[in-house]
Image (cartoon, rainbow, N blue to C red):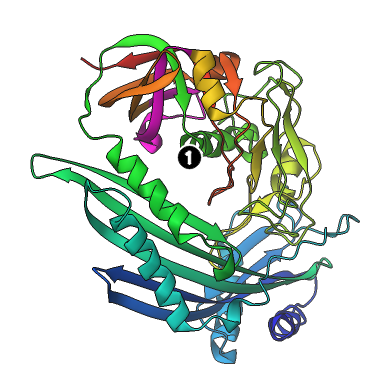
């Protein structure tokens, strides 16, 4: 299948003339979504999409002008029109002396197989059965479950080809699947919600019972929650919350953000920015990562990048252009938002090296504090420019090293700089999650909680 896309990209790039440079990014995918409610199919859809994104660079004495265009179809007429638009857009762009297309850097891509070869053998009836199974398990999980608001199954298969006049010629394919449940626990005078999921490369990797169990636990254990009191205490983040926080933190590790003065890490390379033992790696070649990939958004080989090593800020991630601006080398870390997006530096598969304690052992070592199950307001309350961190939270108090009464409507406030230096425990419960980061239980001391 990818050979067909590669042929389309080859033919388009071959139309370059003179000093003009062209990059063609061709993608196609199929997605299935199923929602079950009360044992019946509420919605079912299967959709196929295809398209091409084109960048045209016009080199000049003051730098290159770049024009971007895309088409949501692989029809020859639509592809030709997109190329014409990209060329026209380039003539109106401002010249940028740092703007270039990526070129091969001699690093061989890792062998990363992201396709479940049996996924296409699973019938639609079996997919429906998985969605029904997660709903049934959630309903039976606890007598306090009032309803299962949604039970979903989804899968996708995608492929892409990337070709440029600078010598990039690459293809990739991937499959993925998930089941999820959203539960409502309680009675008419009080309800609490929870969600759970299971992910994998294909339907055979999914565990509906585990997804349901997670959703049930998260909703039921919050029953009776009251507004928490204000205090300074140790906070223990749930693996999902840790994943979210690391994903936000990755924005400050983007070389593009650094060269633009938009990262609180600017000027601290080689310095201690976290406690000893804190090692943060971006490794898309790790097959366990949801964002695993052999190639980045420019067609360069992904690689293992150690960003913070034993507490020391050791590097940033770069795409080709941000690397040139910084006087550095690209790190195979270009991300791309589909056919309509241009490459930008970003992490894809963050992993924080695990500690030695299980989640229960970490709670026991903390003794007293707050276990944060979920957070809100990340986009408005967290800044990777200043490092400010202020989010809404709900969770459970930790008393005598165990989870105790649930609380809600509190604000957790600190800064990334303080939190990284106040980490007192990293769990051994590494959890692979959707998104750009894995997660594990994480304990941080001296955090301000604002409540009553």
Residue 209 screen position, x and y as percent: 44, 57
Q: Is residue 260 above or below residue 145?
A: above
Q: Secondary structure at mark 1?
A: helix
Foreground: 50 or 184? 184
Q: Is residue 175 left or right of residue 192?
A: right
Count the marks: how many?
1
Q: Is residue 81 above or below residue 344?
A: below
In the rendered view of the protein, which quadrant contains the N terminus? bottom right
Q: Is residue 208 above or below residue 401?
A: below
In the rendered view of the protein, which quadrant contains the C terminus? top left
**Residue 416 in sight in this render:** no
Quadrant of res 262: top right
Check residue 225 for magenta coloring. no
Residue 371 screen position, x and y as percent: 41, 25
The magenta stretch is 367-390
Check residue 387 for magenta coloring. yes
Foreground: 274 or 236? 236
Residue 123 screen position, x and y as percent: 50, 84
Residue tagged by mark 1?
A: 240
**Residue 324 in sight in this render:** yes
Neighbourhood count class around disc 1 (C-alpha, 10 Å): few under 14, some 14–19, many 20 upward:
many
Task: Look at 54% across and 14% down and name the residue there.
Answer: 365
């Amino acid at each position: 299948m990818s050979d067909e896309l590669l042929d389309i990209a080859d033919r388009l790039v071959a139309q370059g003339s003179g000093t003009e440079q062209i990059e063609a990014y061709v993608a196609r995918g199929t997605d299935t979504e199923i929602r079950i409610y009360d044992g019946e199919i509420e919605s079912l859809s299967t959709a196929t999409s295809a398209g091409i994104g084109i960048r045209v660079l016009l080199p000049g004495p003051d730098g290159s002008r770049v024009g971007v265009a895309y088409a949501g179809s692989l029809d020859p007429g639509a592809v030709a029109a997109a190329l014409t638009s990209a060329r026209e857009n380039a003539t109106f762009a401002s010249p940028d002396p740092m703007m270039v297309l990526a070129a091969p850097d001699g690093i061989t891509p890792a062998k990363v197989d992201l396709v479940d070869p049996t996924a296409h053998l699973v019938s639609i009836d079996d997919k429906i059965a998985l969605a029904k199974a997660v709903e049934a398990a959630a309903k039976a999980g606890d007598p306090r479950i009032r309803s299962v608001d949604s039970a979903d199954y989804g899968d996708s298969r995608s492929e892409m080809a990337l070709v440029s006049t600078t010598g990039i010629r690459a293809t990739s394919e991937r499959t993925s699947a998930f089941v999820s449940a959203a539960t409502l626990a309680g009675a008419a005078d009080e309800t609490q919600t929870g969600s759970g999921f299971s992910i994998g490369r294909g339907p055979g990797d999914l565990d509906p019972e585990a997804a349901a169990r997670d959703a049930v636990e998260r909703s039921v254990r919050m029953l009776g929650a009251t507004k928490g009191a204000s205090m300074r205490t140790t906070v223990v983040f749930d693996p999902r919350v840790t994943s979210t926080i690391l994903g936000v933190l990755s924005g400050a590790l983007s070389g593009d953000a650094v060269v633009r003065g938009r990262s609180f890490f600017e000027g601290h390379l080689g310095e201690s920015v976290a406690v000893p033992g804190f090692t943060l790696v971006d490794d898309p070649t790790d097959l366990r990562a949801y964002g695993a990939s052999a190639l980045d958004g420019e067609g360069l080989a992904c690689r293992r990048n150690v960003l913070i090593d034993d507490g020391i800020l050791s590097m940033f991630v770069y795409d080709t252009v941000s690397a040139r601006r910084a006087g550095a080398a690209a790190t195979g870390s270009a991300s791309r938002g589909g056919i309509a997006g241009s490459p930008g530096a970003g992490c894809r598969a963050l992993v924080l090296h695990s500690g030695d304690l299980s989640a229960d052992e970490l709670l026991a070592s903390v003794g007293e504090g707050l276990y944060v199950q979920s957070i809100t307001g990340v986009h408005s309350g967290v800044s990777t420019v200043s490092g400010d961190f202020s989010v809404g939270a709900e969770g459970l108090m930790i008393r005598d090293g165990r989870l105790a009464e649930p609380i809600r409507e509190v604000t957790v406030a600190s800064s990334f700089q303080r939190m990284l230096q106040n980490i007192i425990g990293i769990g051994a419960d590494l959890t692979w999650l959707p998104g750009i980061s894995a997660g594990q239980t994480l304990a941080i001391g001296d955090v301000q909680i604002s409540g009553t």
